[in-house]
Image (tube, grey):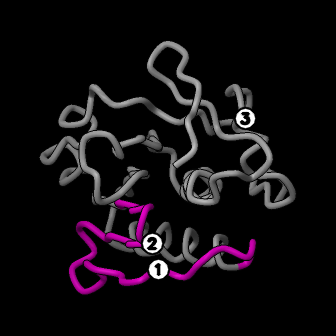
């Protein structure tokens, strides 16, 4: 796996597309952010989990919004030439939808459930990938697939 420079607990997106999973994580975060006002995080969990590299964590206020966020992430990643999820779990209850892309897992919570499980606290010691407009390195990870231009 490619090494990523860390600045104050944040990981910069790799340059030149050397890590497609980071690119898809940034795209997934931006896609989610188009459908929610919740804080959306990209966590580099590879060093502590070993079986997955990136977590994207976000939430919606109600089941309909949770579904919309998950669908938007899946659609925009695929439209940008990214992979389809290997599996999707939680669509029946819409309290915690998990999109499993292998080295990338997108967690879309119902707001109360996100607070209950509090993955941000559980993984508070891992670096966070800069992805928002203005974050260092975030634009390099997206290149032409920038969701913000939609």
Q: Residues within 10 Å of mark 2 (few under 14, many from 20)?
A: many
- Residue 85 shown in magenta: yes
Asked where in the image residue 52 lies, by quadrant, the reply is bottom left
Coordinates of residue 79 in the picture (x, y in percent): 73, 78
Q: What residue is pinned by disc 1?
A: 85
- Mark 1, secondary structure of its residue: loop
Q: CA distance from mark 3 to mark 2?
A: 24 Å
Residues in magenta, as a range: 79-107
Q: CA distance from mark 1 to mark 2?
A: 5 Å
- Mark 2, secondary structure of its residue: loop
Q: Are marks 1 and 2 in contact (CB under 8 Å)?
A: yes
Coordinates of residue 17 in the picture (x, y in percent): 74, 53
Q: What residue is pinned by disc 2?
A: 101
Side (left or right) of 10 relative to 64? right
**Sequence-wise first label, 3 or 2:** 2
Q: Residues within 10 Å of mark 1 (few under 14, many from 20)?
A: some
Question: What's the mark number on residue 133?
Answer: 3
What residue is shown at x 67% (from left), y 27% (from top)? Answer: 135
* Relative height, residue 121 to residue 108 (above, below): above
Q: Point out the frontmost of discs 3 and 1.
A: 1
Coordinates of residue 146 in the picture (x, y in percent): 79, 54
- Mark 3, secondary structure of its residue: loop
For the residue pair 7 and 132, the one nearer the viewer reads as: 7
Q: Are marks 3 and 1 in contact (CB under 8 Å)?
A: no
- Residue 92 shown in magenta: yes
Coordinates of residue 90 in the picture (x, y in percent): 25, 78
């Amino acid at each position: 796996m490619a090494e990523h420079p860390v600045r104050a607990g944040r990981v910069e997106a790799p340059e030149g597309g050397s890590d497609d999973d980071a690119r898809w994580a940034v795209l997934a975060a931006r896609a989610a952010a188009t459908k929610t006002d919740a804080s959306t995080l990209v966590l580099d969990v590879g060093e502590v989990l070993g079986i997955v590299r990136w977590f994207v964590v976000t939430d919606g206020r109600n089941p309909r919004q949770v579904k919309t966020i998950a669908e938007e992430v899946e659609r925009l990643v695929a439209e940008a030439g990214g992979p389809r999820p290997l599996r999707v779990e939680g669509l029946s209850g819409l309290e915690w939808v998990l999109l499993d892309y292998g080295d990338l897992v997108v967690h879309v919570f119902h707001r109360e459930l996100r607070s209950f499980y509090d993955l941000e606290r559980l993984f508070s010691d891992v670096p966070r990938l800069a992805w928002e407009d203005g974050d260092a390195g975030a634009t390099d990870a997206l290149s032409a697939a920038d969701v913000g231009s939609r």
